[in-house]
Amino acid sequence: MISIIYQGLGCLIRIMSEETLKKVYNALKDEPQTPNEIADKINLNQKTVQGALLELANTKKNIKWKKVGRYRLFWKVK
């Protein structure tokens, strides 16, 4: 299954498989993690994981993120 997200008039299109989104979602914890830490855990590319995390943060209410310096931290809220 492929999910497609259209955003605004600029038409941002993100195509990400449901399987990848589930892997990334299941790897998230309730403590902040970088996309690189998650990517190492589930054997995916860091850029792929970051894209999936941003998509999850935009679509799910229990995924939060914060930018600290040049890093992005992601976590689940219980």
Image (spheres, rainbow, N blue to C red):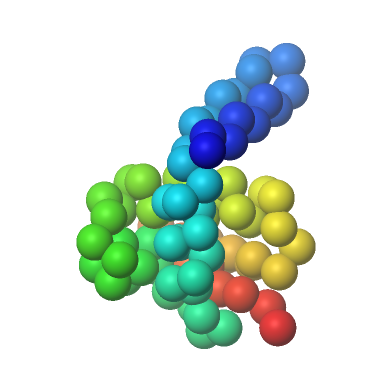
Q: Quadrant of the C terminus?
A: bottom right
Q: Is residue 10 left or right of residue 1?
A: right
Q: Is residue 51 above or below residue 76?
A: above
Asked whether residue 36 appears in the rendered view, the answer is no
The count of marks equals 0
Q: Give the percent coordinates (x, y) of residue 8.
A: 74, 23
User: Between 26 and 60, which is closer to the camera in this rendering?
Assistant: 26
Q: Is residue 37 left or right of residue 76?
A: left
Q: Give the percent coordinates (x, y) of residue 1.
A: 52, 38
Asked whether residue 29 appears in the rendered view, the answer is yes
Q: Give the percent coordinates (x, y) of residue 58.
A: 67, 49
Q: Is residue 13 left or right of residue 17?
A: right
Q: Is residue 22 above or below residue 15?
A: below
User: Between 72 and 5, which is closer to the camera in this rendering?
Assistant: 5
Q: Give the percent coordinates (x, y) of residue 53.
A: 51, 55
**Which residue is rendered at x = 68% and y = 78% of the image?**
77
Outermost residue to the front: 1
Q: Is residue 9 above or below residue 78?
A: above
**Which residue is rendered at x = 53% and y = 35% of the image?**
2
**Which residue is rendered at x = 73% and y = 15% of the image?**
9
